[in-house]
């Protein structure tokens, strides 16, 4: 029996455990299945649906969002689930523990999560070492951020440090300025601050291209809590600075639709079904503002093949999954691949 069919049987056991512990146990199990060859043998047959985006060839439109594999320690296992690409991170220059536990909460009746993990990771050197050990060689996005104690005036130094470190390993690199769980990080989305940051990072990208002999696509991940004027300003900056893609969206600090649900009042970013409508609205605004100049990766509240099709119809070229994977399991990947093929 495949891991896709087994997940509904194991989900009650995982959901009975602390969410962060369940996360670690599930990934360890997937790693073991991959190492033994079981996961790949049991993988579903998916339609061939290649697409070229950012100068890269993706086997299909469905990717893993950043945050699930922060240290790129589980790529071999995750690659067996049928994804067309994986995005790992967020990684910072120096290792950091993140925020105090508990910091991950399930809102089961809402099919949602609240997290305030805070860029917990082992640092960029350990991250790159993990990537080099993996046997998988598909499309890998690497999501980079600043350390929690780096002031915003020096944030560009952290992004440049990470970009240099991951350049050889990454298919593309995502600039994360939209997590709500690192104090002050979202201030980098303000027009003046973002213009300065993107100027520094894209200049470094161009220098690295000369050295490595290839262009490293850059994506910018934005928050769902920005108003339409701010989104249009970001779209203009992305085009002006030659950023290669926009990822819409990160988690939200709003609690629309989950008022009164257990854990809804916890501090952190909300993801899953309650984010669906807002993430789709942000995508639509960006699609209109960008008018095809830059591709968009749609993420946030995708829990079905129909949700995936809605993102493509609204202007996304690729999509990513995270919280939906927790609730639906690997079958969601196959469902979304089939829904967006062709």
Image (cartoon, rainbow, N blue to C red):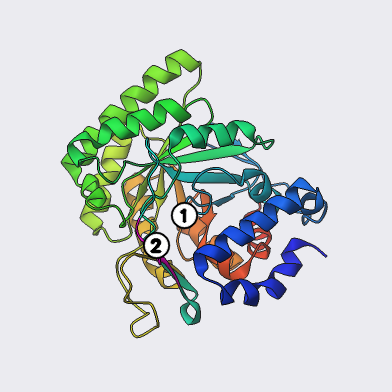
Q: Is residue 251 visible?
A: yes
As helix, strand or loop, the secondary structure at mark 1 comes to strand
Q: Residues within 10 Å of mark 1 (few under 14, many from 20)?
A: many
Q: Is residue 56 visible?
A: no
Residue in the picture at 50% in, 63% down: 20
**What segment carries the magenta color?**
99-105
Tell whether label 1 touches label 2 (CB within 8 Å).
Answer: yes
All told, the count of numbered labels is: 2
Relative to the observer, which residue lies in front, 278 or 295? 278
Q: Earlier in the sequence, mark 2 or mark 1?
A: 2
Residue in the picture at 35% in, 42% down: 145
Q: Position of residue 177 (x, y in %)?
A: 31, 46
Q: Is residue 101 magenta?
A: yes
Residue in the picture at 20% in, 41% down: 152
Q: Which quadrant, please, contains the N terminus?
A: bottom right
Residue 15, relative to residue 232: is it above or below?
below
Q: Is residue 67 magenta?
A: no
Q: Is residue 161 left or right of residue 18?
A: left
Residue 239, relative to residue 44: is it above or below?
above
Q: Which mark is residue 298?
A: 1
Q: Position of residue 168 (x, y in %)?
A: 52, 25
Q: Position of residue 216 (x, y in %)?
A: 46, 28
Q: Residues within 10 Å of mark 2 (few under 14, many from 20)?
A: many
Cα separation, mark 2 vs mark 1, equals 8 Å
As helix, strand or loop, the secondary structure at mark 2 comes to helix
Q: Is residue 115 left or right of residue 36?
A: left
Residue 299, relative to residue 234: is it above or below?
below
Q: Which mark is residue 279?
A: 2
Relative to the observer, which residue lies in front, 232 or 189? 189
Q: Position of residue 84 (x, y in %)?
A: 63, 46
Q: Which mark is residue 164?
A: none
Instruction: Specify the quadrant of the image occupied by residue 151.
Output: top left
């Amino acid at each position: 029996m495949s891991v896709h069919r087994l997940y509904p049987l194991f989900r009650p056991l995982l959901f009975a455990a602390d969410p962060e512990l369940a996360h670690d146990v599930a990934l360890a199990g997937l790693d073991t299945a991959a190492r033994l060859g079981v996961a790949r043998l049991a993988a579903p047959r998916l339609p061939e649906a290649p697409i070229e985006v950012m100068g890269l060839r993706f086997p299909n439109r469905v990717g893993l969002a950043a945050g699930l594999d922060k240290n790129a320690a589980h790529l071999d296992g995750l690659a067996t689930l049928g994804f067309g690409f994986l995005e790992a991170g967020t990684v910072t220059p120096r290792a950091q523990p993140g925020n105090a536990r508990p910091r991950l909460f399930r809102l089961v009746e809402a099919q949602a999560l609240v997290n305030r993990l805070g860029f917990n990771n082992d640092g960029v050197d350990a991250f790159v070492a993990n990537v080099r050990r993996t046997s998988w060689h598909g499309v890998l996005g690497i999501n980079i951020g600043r350390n929690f104690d780096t002031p915003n005036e020096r944030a560009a130094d952290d992004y440049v440090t990470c970009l240099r470190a991951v350049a050889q390993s990454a298919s593309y690199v995502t600039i994360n300025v939209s997590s709500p769980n690192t104090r002050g990080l979202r201030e980098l989305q303000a027009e003046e601050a973002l213009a300065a940051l993107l100027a520094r990072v894209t200049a470094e990208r161009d220098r690295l291209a000369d050295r490595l002999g290839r262009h490293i696509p850059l994506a910018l991940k934005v928050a769902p809590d920005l108003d339409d004027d701010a989104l249009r300003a970001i779209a203009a900056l992305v085009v002006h600075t030659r950023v290669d893609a926009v990822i819409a969206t990160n988690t939200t600090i709003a609690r629309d639709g989950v008022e009164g649900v257990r854990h809804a009042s916890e501090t952190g970013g909300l993801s899953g079904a309650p984010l669906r409508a807002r993430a789709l609205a942000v995508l639509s605004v960006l699609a209109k503002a960008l008018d095809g100049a830059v591709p968009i990766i749609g993420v946030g509240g995708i829990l079905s093949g129909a949700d995936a099709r809605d993102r493509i119809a609204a202007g996304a070229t690729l999509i990513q999954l995270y919280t939906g994977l927790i609730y639906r399991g690997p079958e969601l990947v196959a469902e979304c691949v089939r829904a967006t093929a062709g």
